[in-house]
Structure formats: C-alpha cells, structure tokens
Image (tube, rainbow, N blue to C red):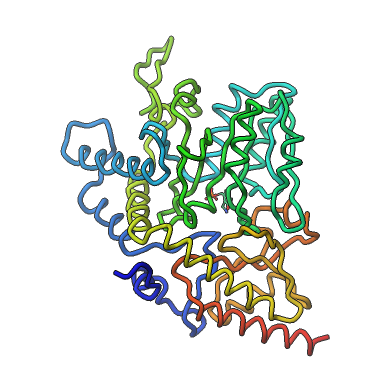
Amino acid sequence: RAPFDVHAVRRDFPILAERVNGRPLIWLDNAATTQKPQAVIDRLAHFYAHENSNIHRAAHELAARATDAYEAARQKVARFLGASSVEEIIFVRGATEAINLVAQSWGRQHIGKDDEIIVSHLEHHANIVPWQMLAAEKGAKLRVIPVDDSGQIRLDEYQKLLNERTRLVAVTQVSNALGTVVPVQQVVELGHRAGACVLIDGAQAVSHLRVNLQQLGADFYVFSGHKVFGPTGIGVVYGKREILEATQPWQGGGNMIQDVTFEKTVYHGAPARFEAGTGNIADAVGLGAALDYLERIGLENVARYEHDLLAYATQGLRTVPGLHLIGTAADKTSVASFVLDGYKTEEVGKLLNQDGIAVRAGHHCAQPILRRFGVEATVRPSLAFYNTCEEVDVLIASLHRLAAAAGRRR
Ligand code: PMP
C-alpha cells in the first residue's frame, strides 16, 4: 500500500468501527492504552488454537511450537529496539513490573546508604514509587530534575544534580501527561559521564518514535505491550548484557534455575534468570505480532503523520475560548493536556463521551508534574496513527459547544 493511508490502516482495527452513545467511537485515549489490529487478535487466537503449551520443559510437539513462538517474539523485540542480542530482552507484565524488577534486583545490589537516584519531574508514578521504596529501604536519596515552563526537563539543572554519589538516573522518554519528548540521548551521555547507570522509561515512546538502543546507549529500557498495539499483561525490560549477567535475580521459582538442592541453587543466565514461573506466553507472541504490524506501517511514517496530526489538534484547541493547554515544549508527541474554564476535568470527560469521544480526565498517574503547573487534573486527548483530522474536528467542535455553554452558565 501507499506510504501511509490512514483509512486503510483504520480497517485493520476492528474496534474503531464501534459506536458509543449512537456516535462513531473516537478513541483519543491512546496514552492509556492502544487498540489492537486484527493481526494481533488473530495471532492470539492462532496460538491458543494451534500452539498452546508451557514452554522450555517438554519433549512434545506443542511445547516446541510454543517455545519457538515465544522466543521468536523475543527476537522481534530485540530487533525492534536495536538491542545487540536476544539475551538482553526480559519479558515481564508491563512497564511497572519492569521498573520494579530493575529496582529490586539491580537496585538492591548497587544502591546503598547516601547514594543518589535521579528522576525527572515528568515521571509517571511507576518511575517514582519503586525508587522511593528502594531509597527508603537503603537510606538512599531521590533527586528530581526540574522542568521549565514549557514542560521540558532542564539539562543545566540535571548536570548540577549529577555527582559521584549518583548511582542511577531514571527518566521517561516521553511524558504521558504532557507529551514532552525528553532529550534522552543527552540524559544518557551526561549520566554515563558521571559514572551512573541510566534507565529510560519508553512506555509512551515506542508507539511513536524509532528507538535504537545501540545508539542511545541506555543501560535499561522498559515498555508495556498494551501501549504499542499489543496485548495487556506483557512488557519488556531491556538490560545491557554484561549488566544483566552480573545482576542477581528478583523472583525465584521454576524456569530461572540451572540446578536446585536444599543447600544451594544455581541460576540460569539472562534472560531466563529474570523470568521465574510460567510467563505470559500468548501475550508475548501477540506483542511480537504487534511489532511486526508496526514495522510494516513503518515508525518513520507514523512519526511524520502524528507530528502533523498533533500540530493540527493543537491549533484547533487554541481556538476554544477558556481552554488552557498545559505542556508546550517544542518537542512533543501525541498528547495534548488542557483544562477548560467553567468545568471540572471529569465533567469534560463525561460530556465528550456523550459525543462518542474517549479521552482521559484525571491526574494520569503523574501528580507531581500536574502540580508543577498548578493543577490536580487535566483533560488529555492522546493520538495514535489511526486517528484522523476529521476526528480531531469532532473533538474541537464538541469543546466549542462546551465552552459556549460555560459562558451561558456564568
Ligand atoms: N511509564 C509511563 C510513562 C506510562 O505512561 C505508563 C502507563 N501510563 C507506565 C510507565 C506504566 O505502564 P503500565 O501501567 O502498563 O505498567
């Protein structure tokens, strides 16, 4: 097909034909979760119809099929991220579990009393709370990179925070609340220069931007399958091979061992040592199908299309009286966050739902950054490559009606 045909793409996503309150569904809650193409739905059904088995342990045919499918998915993830080997890819439940894994394995091993962990003011709670818990356990300190008034992190302040006690820098690539694209290449390079390890939270990045970990050089990179058109319940930790090999496991159990006696257990190498128990086999396979699908569309096409769509949406939102955009960084992707005079954010969410429009209204699990801008909640339309200018037009028209009604209420 042509480089990027949004109407053809939309036909790949059956749910986009749903109706809500008598209107065509307009799914603008992609930062919370993305919809699934038929290719992913079919892959899951195929797995359960033809391949289902536990993996790695049996001599029989279905175990071989399931193991092959699962390991092929790991290879797809490695290729998608530009990892240097499949051993660097660990399957987990999602970005939250991924960060907790790093905190509870590598973190416990390497972070001690008076050590420092740097996060940014933009972080999702999933990239704050696990570090806070670790810091409390170890007597370490959490330091925060401030943001400027556009919602971009301040690299000058970051440089001042880095010192010989900095063990880890954990920063998001894209803010889920504001859409800011953080200059993670510089974050990694400056962190490394100070001798720190760097974790990048890619949960909001991988569906919008091409990631190449060999170029980025991050020590850890995490994301969730469900935000990149794959199933829920599956996510990824990338870790540099030499780091993973030197890191103690997190959870103990089956699959992660080479030999067990009551006296002593010998663990497998990575990634098996970090995948105790029966994993989310089918959903890993489904994630592989999602990444294949996304590669067929082409992330470069996605990025170009979404850039224009976000500019179009931002321009439209600026025409709504009493609407205040929060987060105006020069480099943004796919998220617009705003408050509307005369309305609570939840009210806006409910009223838009009456028009078939799904947006998130709330704190987006990122309370510190919203409070930095003096609010407790925002309305957050978030885009994916299957959204259209026509859908944005419906959103803007609905908001104009709400703004006019607010004027009458006052
Ligand atoms: N980090 C960011 C930036 C996110 O947006 C999210 C999900 N909103 C997470 C981490 C956590 O992802 P999950 O809930 O899928 O574990």
**Picture quadrant where residue 58 is located:** top left
Please provide percent x and percent y for residue 286.
34, 52
Which residue lies most toward the bottom here?
408
Please provide percent x and percent y for residue 66.
25, 42
Where's the C terminus, which quadrant? bottom right
Where's the N terminus, which quadrant? bottom left
Residue drawn at point x = 63 percent, y = 33 percent = 191
Left or right? Give the position of 233 relative to 58. right
**In the image, residue 217 above or below residue 248:** below
**In the image, residue 12 above or below residue 197:** below
Please provide percent x and percent y for residue 127.
62, 43
- Which one is in front, 275 or 277? 275
Residue drawn at point x = 38 percent, y = 69 percent = 4
Which residue lies most toward the left here?
61
Residue drawn at point x = 73 percent, y = 87 percent = 405
- Which one is in front, 215 or 367? 215
Please provide percent x and percent y for residue 182.
62, 49
